[in-house]
């Protein structure tokens, strides 16, 4: 979207910008195009980003910000409150819209305080803001939803498209230390990351089917698999069932990696296979070839949109999805067959290898 001269002039006067994203890892990753749009429109801006504690480790990989702060639950968060109160912000963008972010927005006393129009449903929260940006969350991909807020600040002209012809992509840049740690862990041969776990048990695929896919990758394509995951006991149990179903256990790093190293490992993978969880967005941030399995959730809002992404949905288990609708219903994960995933891996691994993005210089 182009900027008019008047809008561009107003944008250039915005020097100190506070951005609040207090949701999950996936939300932070999908906010990066909005941060990039701010940086492109206002190159000299000093952007401070506040994230939730679960996302704090990922801050060094977020480009275009001068300061990253972590808002921790059940802690005083003196550094965050001090930053909000002591910095003279020209603008505050609240991507979150909850009680904590509304309070931070109000305390910032920024000259322009923006959030989404849907936040007006809470009259108390709405008192913290001056501008409410229309963006129907139900009808927007999450990247586009967050971009709408950035465009509300910088004055991008033109009507927002439901699905842009060239969709904006999330992007991360792990520091060199994380990339080196991932290289040492992965070794020299090609590998595929398999991330079968998530926080919601209804998103889990059947362990024996994961094992069949891992065996196929090893025997048909000659690539080894690295299983990643969190430290949750239920997730470990799920991975344990996958390993038990394998004739030869795969390498497992579940619960062993910090978030930055896990991101760098995904960046270097030949491909990434996962259910609907943060791994989907990490793979998308590096445009890695990937297969994302969706069951009860609608992939319209959260799917990867780069050309090397294959989206499988239990609601349409005959073939990979090519059309996405905001009101598509979900289905149980066991509707996704082993054969469908194996055919998708064959299609994915016969594509020319995707280049790994060059390391940043700083």
Image (cartoon, grey):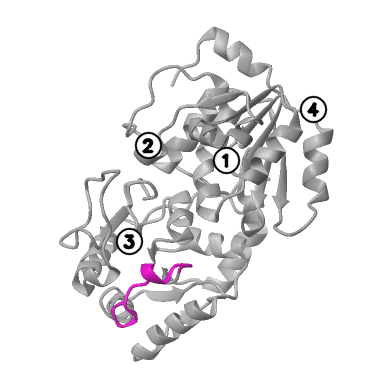
Disc ID at residue 296: 3
**How far is mark 1 from mark 3, CA to CA?**
25 Å
Left or right position of 316 against 262? left
Mark closest to the chain's N terminus, 1 or 3:
1
Mark closest to the chain's N terminus, 4 or 2:
4
Highlighted range, magenta: 198-209
Left or right position of 241 against 266? left
| Residue 44 against residue 7 in the figure, above or below | below
Farthest left residue? 318
Where does the image place residue 112, in percent across and percent down from the top left? 66, 23
Q: At numbered mark 4, what does the secondary structure look like: helix, strand or loop? A: loop
**How far is mark 3 from mark 2, CA to CA?**
24 Å
**How far is mark 1 from mark 2, CA to CA?**
24 Å
Farthest top residue? 6
Q: Which residue is mark 2?
A: 167
Q: Which residue is mark 1?
A: 97
Disc ID at residue 88: 4
Disc 4 vs disc 2: which is toward the camera? 4
Q: Residue at x 40, y 63 (%)?
A: 270
| Contact? badges 3 and 2 (CB < 8 Å) | no
Mark closest to the chain's N terminus, 1 or 4:
4
In the image, 148 versus 306, the foreground residue is 148
Where does the image place residue 298, in percent across and percent down from the top left? 32, 53
Q: Residue at x 61, y 50 (%)?
A: 61
């Amino acid at each position: 979207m182009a900027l008019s001269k008047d809008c561009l002039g107003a944008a250039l006067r915005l020097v100190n910008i506070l951005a609040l994203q207090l949701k999950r890892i996936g939300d932070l990753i999908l906010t990066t195009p909005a941060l990039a749009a701010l940086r492109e429109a206002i190159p000299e801006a000093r952007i401070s980003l506040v994230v939730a504690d679960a996302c704090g480790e990922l801050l060094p990989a977020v480009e275009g910000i001068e300061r990253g702060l972590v808002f921790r639950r059940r802690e005083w968060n003196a550094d965050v409150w001090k930053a909000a109160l002591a910095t003279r912000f020209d603008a505050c963008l609240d991507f979150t819209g909850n009680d904590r972010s509304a309070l931070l927005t109000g305390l910032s006393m920024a000259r322009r305080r923006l959030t989404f129009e849907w936040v007006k449903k809470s009259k108390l929260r709405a008192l913290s803001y001056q501008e409410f940006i229309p963006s129907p969350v139900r009808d927007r991909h999450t990247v586009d939803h967050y971009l709408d807020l950035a465009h509300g600040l910088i004055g991008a002209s033109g009507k927002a498209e439901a699905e842009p012809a060239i969709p904006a992509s999330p992007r991360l840049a792990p520091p060199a230390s994380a990339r080196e740690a991932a290289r040492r862990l992965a070794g020299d041969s090609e590998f595929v990351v398999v991330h079968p776990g998530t926080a919601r048990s209804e998103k889990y695929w059947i362990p024996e089917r994961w094992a069949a896919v891992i065996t196929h990758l090893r025997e048909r394509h000659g690539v080894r698999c690295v299983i990643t995951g969190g430290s949750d006991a239920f997730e470990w149990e799920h991975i344990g069932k996958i390993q038990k179903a394998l004739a030869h256990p795969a390498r497992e790093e579940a619960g062993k990696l910090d978030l930055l190293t896990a991101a760098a490992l995904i960046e270097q993978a030949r491909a990434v296979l996962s259910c609907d969880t943060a791994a989907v967005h990490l793979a998308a941030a590096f445009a890695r070839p990937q297969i994302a399995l969706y069951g009860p959730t609608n992939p319209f809002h959260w799917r990867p949109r780069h050309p090397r992404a294959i989206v499988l949905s239990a609601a349409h288990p005959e073939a990979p999805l090519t059309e996405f609708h905001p009101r598509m219903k979900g289905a149980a994960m066991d509707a996704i067959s082993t054969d469908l995933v194996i055919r998708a891996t064959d299609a994915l691994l016969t594509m020319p290898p995707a280049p790994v993005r060059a390391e940043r210089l700083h």
